[in-house]
Image: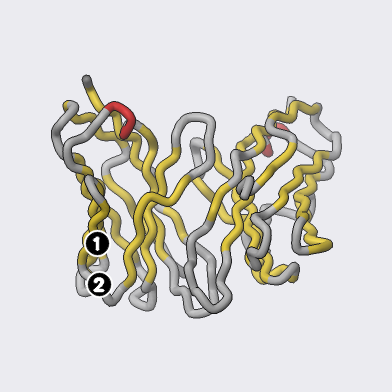
């Protein structure tokens, strides 16, 4: 089955700086890679996703890059703000009719004002 | 839409008691997932349903756990008997495959279970 590793487990950055979280996956058949943000006391919420036919996707201050050859993908947050403080999870799946997501272990991001 | 609805939000029970967690998925969604989240093990998929049929229950820890989906708008996760190690936050999520193949899983707010 799929195995997803995520690094770092904790990350602190100054407000306004950039944050990068990295994930690797094991199943070369995986082709859908979402990122979720979980705030305290809430369920995870999708913030951005990428499919295997795309190398990069951007949504305002958030971007995700994918390297299928190396089987890794990364989340980039620029111009960080205090409200970006949360736990971020990456995930991977082979979505050919199978919706089962395998999640990484999470990164606790703290933005220092 | 109100999103995925879970009840109760908090549950405190004593070891050996039966616990039932409830979930109402987003209307029209055809997939429903139950996850457990702990500090030690992170987010674990317990079971998921497609069109009310269980597809993969390999994540269910043991026979004390059971899940049902009697119709498209309701699912339960039952633990009987409960044990202290079952203490965790349990999330329900739903998604729509259909023609859009959107994949996005929408999570509920979770049920925090404490077994004393």
Secondary structure, mark 1, is strand
Q: Residues within 10 Å of mark 1 (few under 14, many from 20)?
A: some
Q: Nearer the viewer, residue A46 or B44?
A: A46
Left or right of A53, for residue B5: right
Question: Disc 1 is attached to a residue of which chain?
Answer: A
Residue drawn where x is 20% and y is 45% of the image: A20
Residue furthest to the top in view is A113
Left or right of A59, for residue B41: right
**Residue B8 % position (x, y):** 74, 35
Residue A94 placement: quadrant: bottom left
Q: Are marks 2 and 1 in contact (CB under 8 Å)?
A: yes
Residue A38 can be seen in this image: yes
Tag 2 residue: A54
Residue drawn where x is 37% and y is 73% of the image: A31
Q: CA distance from mark 2 to mark 1?
A: 7 Å
**Whether marks 2 and 1 lie on the same chain:** yes
Tag 1 residue: A57
Query: How many numbered tags mark residues here?
Result: 2
Residue A105 can be seen in this image: no
Identify the image quadrant of the C terminus of chain A. Answer: top left
**A107 vs A72: above or below:** above
Left or right of B71, for residue B102: left
Residue drawn where x is 32% and y is 39% of the image: A9
**Residue B32 % position (x, y):** 65, 60
Secondary structure, mark 2, is loop
Residue drawn where x is 57% and y is 67% of the image: B96
Q: Residues within 10 Å of mark 2 (few under 14, many from 20)?
A: few
């Amino acid at each position: 089955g799929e195995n997803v590793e995520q690094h770092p487990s904790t990350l602190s950055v100054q407000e306004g700086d950039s944050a990068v979280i990295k994930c690797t996956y094991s199943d070369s058949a995986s082709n859908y890679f979402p990122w979720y943000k979980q705030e305290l006391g809430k369920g995870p919420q999708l913030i951005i996703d990428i499919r295997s036919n795309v190398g990069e996707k951007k949504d305002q201050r958030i971007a995700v890059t994918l390297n299928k050859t190396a089987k890794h993908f990364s989340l980039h947050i620029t111009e960080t703000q205090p409200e970006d403080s949360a736990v971020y999870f990456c995930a991977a799946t082979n979505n050919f009719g199978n919706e089962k997501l395998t999640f990484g272990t999470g990164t606790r991001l703290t933005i220092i004002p | 839409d109100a999103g995925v609805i879970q009840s109760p939000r908090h549950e405190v029970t004593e070891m050996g008691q039966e616990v039932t967690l409830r979930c109402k998925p987003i209307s029209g969604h055809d997939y429903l997932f139950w996850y457990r989240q702990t500090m030690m093990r992170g987010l674990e998929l317990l079971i998921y349903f497609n069109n009310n049929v269980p597809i993969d229950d390999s994540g269910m820890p043991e026979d004390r756990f059971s899940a049902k989906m009697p119709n498209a708008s309701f699912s339960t996760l039952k633990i009987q008997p409960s044990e202290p190690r079952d203490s965790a936050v349990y999330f329900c999520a739903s998604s729509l495959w259909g023609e859009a193949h959107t994949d996005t899983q929408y999570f509920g707010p979770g049920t925090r279970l404490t077994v004393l």
